């Protein structure tokens, strides 16, 4: 497997263009199953998970055509299968998002169970309970979810706990259902809103996305559309923290500034000078070390769990003490043992990390244990003394497009070592 070799000490300066959101493009790609007509998606990020999603859709018989850089056409008018094999699902948990669209459009879906996850269980029972409430006949055996329905029927369904993929799956299932579907305690993330806007552009009737109650009036069919994927707020936030942790000045371009409001506020607390434009944000630390900031994750619009690891790295070299509390996933501090190898001072107590900032981290050989933990290790390596070798970088490639090229353009000393 590839590795990243980073020599710390560079002050990052410059501009970086932010790609389309990983957490948005995957449900949008799944939603292309809902129509026979051509759907063209632009601003698709160059990520391993996108490659997996294309393999998944191709396995169903979807015609997938790359028309130009990061613009892809999909047509699902002649599906040959409704089964998502474990070989694909084990590589990308988001494969579960095919369940709702396949069931709604084809009347049947067979999707392998995603299984566990390094950062938490993330069970799919809410997806299944919601589909059953809509009239689906669902069995789970031999490691597969097998769902059938002549036509799903809208109903009122309340999700506990709130789930992003559950909201998306049920929303996609409901757009072709009979009658109205009301999703209560729905996820409010921008990626859910992006999916709703995409579905509406295809002729669906979805309202309330971005609030805790989403209403979907079922329609008979959807049509094709051209649509651009929303910018990745987590990629943007990661480069903003990269500026802060190195004492540099970085502008992130092509972003939705509203999606980054809380991250921006935390970086201002950390001592950054922040300038906000119409679709860009500049973070300037003017050579200063960061001030520690306390973090507690929670579903949107509160602080995103996907930015917790990055701010933990920032706090590890801040001037003072801080606490980082994780409330979303039960096992999302796997980056802490790796930071300790780099001489960070962090104490873990359940879902709370107490961080005492140190003047210097030290380069070491570390592992990228999951997607966002990998970003944490990259950020720590940027400021560590000496060289840091990051292993298992396939996790990074799942969510950060061309990270070594983008960081290199900002002045980082970073090299990909091929296996």
Image (spheres, rainbow, N blue to C red):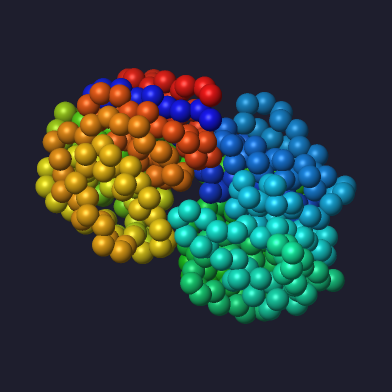
Q: Which quarter of the picture shows residue 218?
A: bottom right
Instruction: Using the image as rendered, state which of residue 253 and residue 79 is in the foreground.
Output: 79
| Residue 366 position within the rendered picture, expressed as x and y whole percent measured from the top left | 36, 36
Q: Residue at x 34, y 20 (%)?
A: 413
Viewer can see residue 415: yes
| Residue 390 position within the rendered picture, expressed as x and y whole percent measured from the top left | 40, 32
Q: Is residue 18 above or below residue 11?
A: below
Instruction: Using the image as rendered, state which of residue 128 and residue 74 is in the foreground.
Output: 128
| Residue 236 position within the rendered picture, expressed as x and y whole percent measured from the top left | 40, 39
Query: In this image, 285 relative to 121: left or right?
Result: left
Query: In this image, 59 relative to 89: left or right?
Result: right
Q: Is residue 199 above or below residue 371?
A: below
Instruction: Using the image as rendered, state which of residue 276 and residue 231 is in the foreground.
Output: 231
Q: Residue at x 51, y 63 (%)?
A: 121
Q: Which quarter of the picture shows residue 157?
A: bottom right
Q: Is residue 275 above or below residue 307?
A: above
Q: Residue at x 47, y 34 (%)?
A: 393
| Residue 296 position within the rendered picture, expressed as x and y whole percent measured from the top left | 29, 60
Q: Residue at x 69, y 72 (%)?
A: 131
Q: Which quarter of the picture shows residue 225?
A: top right
Query: In this image, 249 relative to 59: left or right?
Result: left
Viewer can see residue 239: no
Q: How many marks?
A: 0
């Amino acid at each position: 497997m590839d590795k990243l070799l980073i020599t710390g000490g560079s002050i990052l300066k410059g501009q970086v263009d932010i790609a389309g959101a990983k957490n948005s493009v995957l449900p949008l790609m799944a939603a292309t199953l809902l129509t026979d007509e051509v759907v063209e998606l632009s601003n698709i990020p160059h990520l391993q998970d996108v490659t997996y999603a294309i393999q998944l859709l191709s396995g169903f018989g979807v015609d997938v055509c790359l028309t130009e850089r990061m613009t892809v056409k999909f047509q699902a008018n002649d599906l040959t299968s409704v089964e998502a094999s474990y070989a694909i699902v084990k590589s990308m948990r988001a494969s579960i998002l095919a369940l709702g669209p396949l069931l709604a459009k084809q009347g049947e879906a067979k999707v392998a169970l995603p299984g566990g996850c390094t950062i938490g269980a993330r069970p799919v029972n809410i997806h299944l309970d919601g589909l059953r409430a809509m009239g689906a006949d669902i069995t789970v055996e031999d490691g597969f979810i097998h769902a059938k329905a002549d036509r799903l029927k809208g109903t009122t369904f309340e999700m506990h706990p709130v789930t992003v993929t559950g909201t998306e799956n049920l929303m996609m299932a409901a757009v072709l259902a009979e009658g109205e579907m009301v999703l209560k305690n729905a996820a409010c993330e921008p990626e859910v809103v992006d999916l709703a806007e995409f579905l509406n552009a295809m002729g669906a009737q979805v309202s309330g996305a971005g609030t805790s109650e989403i209403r979907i009036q079922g329609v008979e069919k959807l049509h094709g559309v051209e649509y651009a994927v929303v910018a990745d707020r987590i990629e943007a936030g990661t480069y903003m923290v990269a500026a802060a942790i190195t004492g540099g000045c970085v502008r992130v371009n092509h972003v939705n500034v509203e999606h980054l409001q809380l991250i921006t506020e935390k970086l201002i607390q950390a001592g950054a000078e922040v300038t906000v434009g119409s679709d860009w944000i500049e973070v300037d630390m003017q050579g200063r070390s960061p001030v520690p900031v306390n973090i507690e994750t929670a579903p949107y619009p509160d602080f995103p769990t996907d930015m917790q690891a990055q701010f933990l790295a920032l706090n590890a070299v801040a001037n003072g003490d801080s606490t980082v509390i994780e409330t979303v996933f039960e096992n999302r501090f796997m980056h802490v043992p790796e930071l300790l190898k780099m001489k960070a001072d962090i104490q873990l107590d359940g879902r709370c990390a107490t961080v005492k900032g140190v003047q210097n981290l030290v380069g070491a050989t570390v592992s990228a244990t999951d997607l966002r933990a990998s970003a944490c290790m990259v950020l720590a390596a940027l400021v560590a003394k000496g060289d840091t070798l990051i292993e298992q970088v396939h996790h990074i490639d799942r969510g950060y497009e061309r990270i070594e090229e983008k960081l290199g353009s900002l002045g980082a000393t970073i090299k990909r070592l091929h296996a």
